[in-house]
Amino acid sequence: MLARGGRPMGSETRPPLDEALFLVDGTYTVYRSYFAVSRLTAPDGTPTNGVYGFVSTLRKILREWSPRRFAVAFDLEGPTHRNERYEEYKANRQPPPPDLVPQFEIAHRVAEAMGWPVVEREGFEADDVIAGLVRRARERGVPVVIVTADKDLYQLVGDGVWVLNPARDRLLDRDGVEEVFGVPPEQVVDVLALMGDASDNVPGVPGVGQKTALALVRRYGSLDAVLERARRFRALWDAREQALAALADGDDAALTRALAAARPPAAWLADLEQRLGGDEGEDLAARFRAVAELADDSPPKDVRRALKALEKKTQARTWLAIADNEDKARLSEELVRIPMDVDVDVPFERLVPEMPDIVAAIELFRSLGFRSLTRELEEEAAAGGWTRETVAASLETEILDTEQRLEQWLEQAGAAPALALDTETDALDPRRARLVGVSLAVAPEGGAYVPVGHRTAERQVAWDRARGLLARLVGREDLPKIGQNLKYDLAVLRRAGLEVGGALFDTLIAAQLLDPGRTTSHRLDDLAQRYLGASMISYREVSRGGDEDEELTLDLVPVADVARYAVEDAVVTWQLAEVLRGELERAGLAALFDEIEAPLVRVLEEMEEVGIRVDGAMLERMARELRAELERVEREIHELAGHPFNVNSPQQLRTVLFEELQLVPSGRRTQKTRVHSTGQEVLEALAAQHPLPARVLEFRELSKLLGTYVEALPKLIDPEDGRVHTRFHQLGAATGRLSSSDPNLQNIPIRTPLGRRIREAFVPEPGWVFVSADYSQMELRILAHLSGDPELIRAFREGRDIHAWTAATVTGVPLDEVGPELRARAKAVNFGIIYGMSEFRLAREQGMSRDEARAFIEAYFARYRKVREYIDGVIEHVARHGEVRTLFGRRRSFPELIETDEGTRGGLSRPQREALLRQAVNATVQGTGADIIKRAMVRLRERLRAGRLGARMVLQVHDELLLEVPQAETATVEELVREVMEGAAQLAAPLAVDVRSGPNWAAVH
């Protein structure tokens, strides 16, 4: 449950949050801090306890999580959209303490000085702003962590969205919300609507508090169901005297039996209607039908006694209150539901923590009386070499705003050993960005800026002319190019008609390669601070244009201001390249960088530009089908359960599985409540006992893929070309593997029918085909090579079925007698051994006893002794050196595993240490796989260009490379891609590649 490295509530492992957007509820944080922190005042008497808690909380988050994306949301003064719906919203709220009010404005100033992006929108609260950003992040496949203790925001938690309670260091996923609040996220609004919120004047239902609201929603599943039940209760309550009179000479026992079955017989009702007459009888008969639903899920006892007892039940007051205040409950539902459609006018890419204005921050903290925080900043400044002057203050900056000046500068720079460059644009998406200017540097003392797209410039070079002149230097193949995140600059310049030639040195990639764990930021200003001890001009400084409230795009900023900022970027990357080159060489990473990572930048830029064609109409048809399928599966689940319930509610699902169906649970319980989990592993185990768990798994898969891909992908199709342009992250995983976002195409299932249907929507251009090249059993071949195990190597060299071979060699069963079950066990061990598979997991997955699983694993290592020796050797190495390496030298650090006389340096528990050791072993194998496929991509690009082929790489997922190929080139490309990929590394167990072509992505598998 701890932050940074701790286990989140409701989950087995800490989720991958390296790319996550952390959204802080700034208003709530200041408010809570005001009451949590003892009274503090600045030397001038200004109250500061809320601000102090705010600063401490955010610095703690940044320190422990090192988020790459970050923003703080605040309320703005004035009415909100909720006041338009309900004028009394927050009308009765007690005014905030007078000494709290000024602290919100101070918190704003602190955020500005510390480089924390602030997001807000007039007419909306911080909650609404956060929800709008959550929606945008989900559309891009970016995880989100909402930093707050406000229960209202629990409703946003779901796939890829967590809540982090900073006060308790709890990271809550869906199950975690249920553990701490009592219901899962999708029921939070229902509970809040019933209980209301007096502080915000959300009415709720009078007399219904949190405990009652939770109990009702847990039992009946939704606000709709609770209100329907209340209406029925009110109807029966109003008719109880009439009903008792009707029963006086009727067959009470027959009615009781009928109501227990919830099917009152027509004859009985007809008799009732005849005795009472017409509408009155029909109305009362309808009321009787409600009795079964008011029986608390058990058959009603004698109906006469039940009717008389209604008024004696204490819950009657609750039901009547709900029935009589349905309008308030509905209004409250509307008020507490946070809309996801709020648009926040800030580029998504700007949501990053920037370098602080350290001098301004220290002065502000000192003026607020924050002595300890001031001291911390001063120490950080001293350690990092922060100074008041930026790099730009000491640089020579030339503005090349005429063709003559540009030609002269280029001529003088022609003999330089390298060229650092940076583009300035008006947008962060290279496909939408308009070029504003280009900065250049060929020495560490200064550089030049070429303005080409400023709207207010008196003089600048027309791009058509500048492009031709710049091509002389920028296009030179013999001149290395330096930059930060060069993939962006290459894309912008390519779209502007200027190709960048020469070898590349990307300072971002170099820094990430040196620190693959992403424990620190790799932004240019942070790298400058870390490696050069230098402070840089922030984007905020140059884009504000003297107006603190308005951020301009650079095309509207004066040329001189942009020139200082842009040249500083180019010069700093030049200086960083010199430092990072030495760091790479000392770390033994120079060859990996030069031969694989640096040239891969071009490959990925071209793949992003090409994109992949998606049939949006097919996905829209599929969405309609899946919604209907989802409803069908839900009906099946209800039929199997014997009644409707909320399938998304773990609590209700637990009731159905373990109480009503009496299934025997095996597996973990949730941490706090100690109730049985309803996670995937548990449901898979329960599927052998009853068909309902399998249907729930199907329901979840349908729901997740519908929302994540089928409905989301059409929104990401570029209308210009009908293609989706995913963004590749070159070092997206610590192992070196690629990742992707906007959208994330790495996790579309490949082996499920639904996953294959989604892949059918990925199609080539007319007249083209897809060619898929997939490494066969790549990681096992790497393990065989790294371990040198003769049995594994022999099997691969002879082209054996490796899993059948393993089964035969481990058990002694003749190869031709190995059956499917035994082969499946061997396959599970072959693939699982790389990830440290335990006997428990093998037993669970293969339906074996733990003794059988233990014996199989022991026999495996007895046969493949070199594999055991290799794993032990990696563990011994990481305990001594705190790092592991791949075959090509890629490094992954595990400093906490270094053993000393007192134990491991990290003070790890046994489970934590074992988990990290598994990661260390896996990193050598999976990391080598990443190196090999990246090497293949670089070589394949060269071969395709050399052969003047039109084929182009469009996706890289796991061990697969997908190409879009003109039909006439299919055979040639199939042969070429197999040759290149199989030759990317010479292993003792030779690489093998499966190559297939087809009309869509699904067809090539």
Image: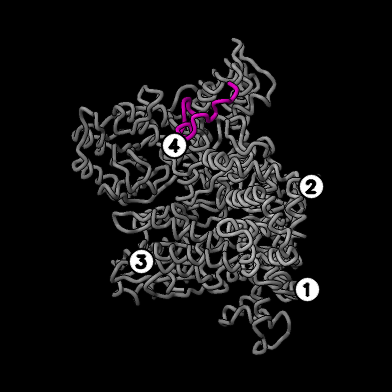
- Relative image position of residue 921 (x, y in whole percent): 66, 60
Amino acid bearing label 1? Ser
The region drawn magenta spans 76-95
Mark 1 and mark 2 lie on one chain; the one further toward the N terminus is 1
Q: Main secondary structure of the magenta part?
A: loop
| Label 3 element class | helix
Q: Look at mark 4 in the image and give the residue it sits on.
A: 575
Give whichever of 96, 833 is nearer the camera: 96
| Label 1 element class | loop
Q: Look at mark 3 in the image and give the residue it sits on.
A: 943
- Relative image position of residue 831 (x, y in whole percent): 63, 69
Residue 505 visible in rendering = yes
Residue 66 visible in rendering = no
83 inside magenta stretch: yes
616 inside magenta stretch: no
Q: Look at mark 2 in the image and give the residue it sits on.
A: 903
Mark 2 and mark 3 lie on one chain; the one further toward the N terminus is 2
